[in-house]
Image: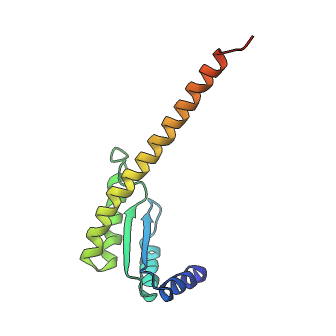
Amino acid sequence: MEGAAEGIRAARLSGFLMCVHACVHAESELEEMAELIQFAQSLDVDGIVITCANGGSNSAHPDAAALQQKVLEVRRLIQSKWWEAFSRLVESVVSGERHLAQNAAEAAVRGQQGSNVNEESVKVA
């Protein structure tokens, strides 16, 4: 964490605003997340954003409700209603970007597979 702290200090001295983005996973411990938030606040960051690791998009998964509850608990540790609300907004955008990236990657693979089929069927005699 010392490397991260030094990077944050250097960026702050260069005039950058600092916002920490932490993703909560099913295996994330509340105590560890609380330590991370306290550490970030000790570095005087401008904000902290907490999102669900999977974007909260897999609501059919049995552990999704427990994960969402954990995310809410971690967000409360920020102790800022504004950053809690901003975290919810960012989560929907981050989730959308992940889906767009995944869809683009899948489309690229399909396109490549399709072009391979066409390339193999065209032979020069």
Q: Quadrant of the N terminus?
A: bottom right
Determine which quarter of the picture holds residue 117: top right
Q: Position of residue 50 (x, y in %)?
A: 37, 68
Q: Position of residue 46 (x, y in %)?
A: 38, 82
Q: Position of residue 80 (x, y in %)?
A: 28, 79
As drawn, 117 above or below 43: above
Q: Is residue 115 left or right of residue 14?
A: right
Residue nearest the observer in this picture, 98 or 78: 98
As drawn, 7 above or below 87: below
Residue nearest the observer in this picture, 80 or 76: 80
Instruction: Confirm whether residue 66 shows in the render.
Output: no
Determine which quarter of the picture holds residue 69: bottom left
The outermost residue toward the top is 125
The outermost residue toward the right is 125
Residue nearest the observer in this picture, 120 or 87: 120
| Residue pictured at 55% horizontal, 35% vertical | 109
| Residue pictured at 35% horizontal, 64% vertical | 70
| Residue pictured at 26% horizontal, 69% vertical | 85
Q: Position of residue 76 (x, y in %)?
A: 30, 74
As drawn, 21 above or below 57: below
Instruction: Confirm whether residue 24 shows in the render.
Output: yes
Instruction: Count all numbered tags in the image, as a single digit.
Output: 0
As drawn, 31 above or below 26: below
| Residue pictured at 42% horizontal, 54% vertical | 54
Q: Quadrant of the C terminus?
A: top right
How are the residues colored? rainbow
